[in-house]
Image: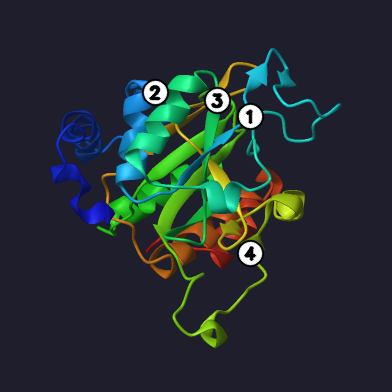
Amino acid sequence: MSAGFGRRAGGQGRFARISQWMRGGHTDETAVGDGGREDLLLATAAAGLPLAPAAHPVGYRCSCDRVGCPTPARHPVSWAWQTQSTTDRAQVERWARHQPDANFITATGMTHDVLDVPREAGREALDRLLAAGVEVGPVAVTGGGAGTGEGRMMFFTLTRGTPQDEDEWWPCALDCHPETMDEHPGLRWHCRGSYVLVPPAALPGEERVEWVRGPEHPLPDPLSLLEALTDACARHHVGAEDADAFETTWPHGA
């Protein structure tokens, strides 16, 4: 799937630049260049992440007709988004060209899952994982501007949501669905029945969803990232007044 994406024609140049930037040791999401919208969407679909159109911002409102939309510009356009989601190049091209303002979501639990954490916790975990030589995979950021401490970081992984034997599927307390997002302020595990926005996406207030590591990176096993992400989330939620006590409980070493 995504392991061979870097060899596909048309996608190598842009994401080779991202890979080169990452090899330089940088994990500041503002350093990643912005590619063309259609090219980035096609690259994401080519990596095996199924896409479907989503709402977009109109000023500080959502493009949908729902009064007081609770998730403006963050939800699919169609209620049938799970069956509509596709990696078909021609369909993604049609959507991108006929809906030039649309954001796009990717349905999780089909070919991939997403581990979704507060952005500052994600940056800490990403530094730790890369320093340890762990294969991280694609990573995107969403939310506030650089240095604000807001937003989320999303780690794309292999899925555990579609086993051949349905009895082997195991839900857990971290599973997150669109209607339970507020119940998971720390780590969210998007698997079956959930979705996330994919870059490039625009949010109200001129916020963006952007790649830190592009979809040419192979999808890792989610369990290989889980410990670093949960540890970073725990540190992220400890107040500054508890920092000294925290150092003893949660050592920073690998």
Mark 1 to mark 3: distance in Å?
A: 6 Å
Mark 1: which secondary structure?
Answer: loop
Mark 1 to mark 4: distance in Å?
A: 24 Å
Callout 1 amino acid:
Ala
Mark 2 to mark 1: distance in Å?
A: 15 Å
User: What residue sits right under mark 4 in the picture?
Assistant: 175
Residue 138 x/y as whole percent: 36, 47
Mark on residue 37? 2
Judging depth in this view, the residue of 139 and 98 nearest the camera is 98
Mark 4: which secondary structure?
Answer: strand
Callout 2 amino acid:
Arg
| Earlier-in-chain disc, 4 versus 3 | 3
Label 2, residues with CA under 10 Å away: few <14, some 14-19, many ≥20 = some
| Earlier-in-chain disc, 1 versus 3 | 1
Mark 2 to mark 3: distance in Å?
A: 10 Å
| Earlier-in-chain disc, 2 versus 1 | 2
Mark 3: which secondary structure?
Answer: loop
Q: Is mark 1 in CB contact (under 8 Å) with mark 3?
A: yes
State the residue at coordinates (76%, 55%). 183
Vertical relation: 164 (above or below) 58: below
User: What residue sits right under mark 1 in the picture?
Assistant: 55
Q: Is residue 117 among the parts visible in the rendering?
A: no
Callout 3 amino acid:
Ala
